[in-house]
Amino acid sequence: MIEAVGLGAGIIGIIAWGPQIRQVWVHKRHDGISIPTFGIVALSLFLWLLYGVAIGSMAMVISNILTLSVILIIIIGVLRCRKSESLDDD
């Protein structure tokens, strides 16, 4: 039961990033997104992933792998948008 609650919380956390992905990938909006901040968030998630592995919590492992994937999708989208804008300015 506790793992189910953790997995549910993880899924909700992943869904919460949906609007951000949409803004970056569909609308090409990246203003206000700090790559260093997202890097720190990714590091934190990675450490939580290691913790989840250490204590044997599948909910933590699955949630953190998926959330790390979402964060990487956002970072890649932002870098892609910024590179495209940089090329347009030249």
Image: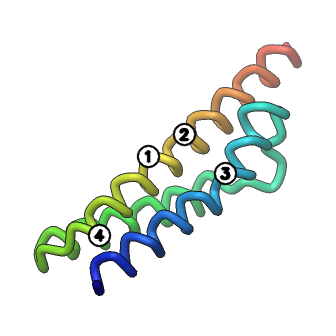
Left or right for 10, reference 76: left
For the residues labelled 2 and 1, say whether their Cβ atoms are less than 8 Å apart.
yes
Q: How far is mark 3 from mark 4, CA to CA? A: 20 Å
Q: In the picture shown, does residue 63 fall above or below 88?
A: below
Residue 27: image location, x then y, percent: 84, 34
Residue 48: image location, x then y, percent: 31, 72
Find residue 69 and name its label.
Answer: 1
Find residue 73 and name its label.
Answer: 2
Residue at x 15%, y 68% (from the top left corner): 53
Identify the residue under disc 3: 18
Q: Amino acid at mark 2?
A: Ile
For the residues labelled 2 and 3, say whether their Cβ atoms are less than 8 Å apart.
no
Q: How far is mark 2 from mark 3, CA to CA? A: 11 Å
Find residue 59 and name its label.
Answer: 4
Q: How far is mark 2 from mark 1, CA to CA? A: 6 Å
Left or right for 19, reference 39: right
Nearer the camera: disc 2 or disc 3: 3
Q: How far is mark 4 from mark 2, CA to CA? A: 21 Å
Frontmost residue, 12 versus 79: 12
Under circle 2, the secondary element is helix
Q: Amino acid at mark 4?
A: Ala
Frontmost residue, 87 versus 60: 60
Mark 4 or mark 1, which has the lower sequence index?
4
